[in-house]
Image: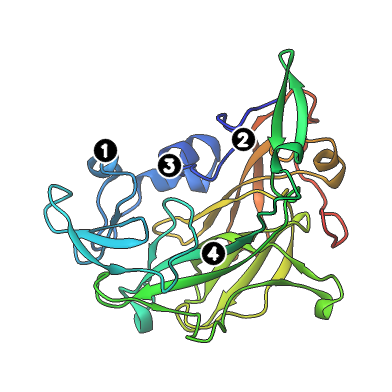
Amino acid sequence: MNTGHETMHINRLIISLSLIWAILPGPLAAQADHQLLPGELPYEEVKDECQEALRLQSGKLFREVEKIAETSSDDGKTWQTHGPISPFTLGGKLDHVAIQLQSPKYKGRIVVPLYLGMYGKHPDYDYKEQGGYAIYRGEVIRLQTHTHHPEMSGSFVCYSDDDGKTWQSCVTHNGRGFMVGYFKDGHMGHMTCEEPVVVELKDGRLMCYMRSTCGRIIKSYSEDGGEHWMKVQPTDIAMSNSPCAMKSLPGTGDLVLVWNMMSADEICKGYRRGRLCIAISKDDGDTWENVRTLDQNPGVETKNWVEPPPLQAM
């Protein structure tokens, strides 16, 4: 059973195209020799760059340090600090999730997905006594904390049209515009909706995948470069309350997804992150194929696909 420092924790996973080409066969593997797009650099030239840096179409590097935007015009030797990305002091984001849009209307826009969480802290509710525990190599270890504590969250994006100098948010000054886990007209209450990842689809829309407690990846779409987002909907992709990673492949726009594909029964047994999978979509995320298991815990059955559970709090 993996601990918190092992590979099941993918919130800091960097999707390397060289790794993906080695895993998925056929047309995807052939893309290793694809024609470079304007502003795109060969993998060998950028593989040792700061892993938090995004190469912009202008040639600059962009990174985020504690939600402050920074750019470099000399390949990372020096960095210029700009203003805060988010309008909120609180909140968080995953690593390596900033993207720059290619569609003509919003070309050059930097989009950074973030989330705002609210977590209870109560003198009459000892967090150390809560959570999911297991015996690992003869020792009692704490495996789970989320959902064992009072918490809720919503996701949002911030965007810049001037290479990170100034920023705007999809959330208005009065707090409207969050992506929220709100299903069946509220009859299921509110579920977590956090740790978002965003990709630009072939038709120019943005798609956001998020972590939730409903046993599935949840999603939303934007038709205006991230300024407004459609109501959050559940996907048919089974996933525990864990983050996923998703990237758009250069040249084709096909999507690659890495996530913890777990059944409701496996989640109940403590295997929230017991299976790490990868898949590709050629139709903007409508379907996923070439599903492979990258790693799994002992005791977890090898499966090519896990059917999502009925929509429920998990």
Residue 310 placement (x, y as % from top left):
88, 59
Tag 4 near tag 3, CB within 8 Å: no
According to the picture, the residue beneath numbered tag 4 turns out to be 115
The residue under label 2 is which amino acid type? Met
Residue 33 placement (x, y as % from top left):
35, 45
Tag 4 near tag 2, CB within 8 Å: no
> Who comes first in sequence, dot 4 or dot 3?
3
Q: Secondary structure at mark 4?
A: strand
> Who comes first in sequence, dot 2 or dot 1?
2
Query: Can residue 230 be seen?
Result: yes
Cα distance, mark 1 to mark 3? Answer: 12 Å
The residue under label 4 is which amino acid type? Tyr
Observer-side mark, 4 or 2, equals 4
Q: Is residue 26 above or below residue 225?
A: above
Q: Secondary structure at mark 3?
A: loop
Give residue 305's mark.
none
The residue under label 1 is which amino acid type? Asp
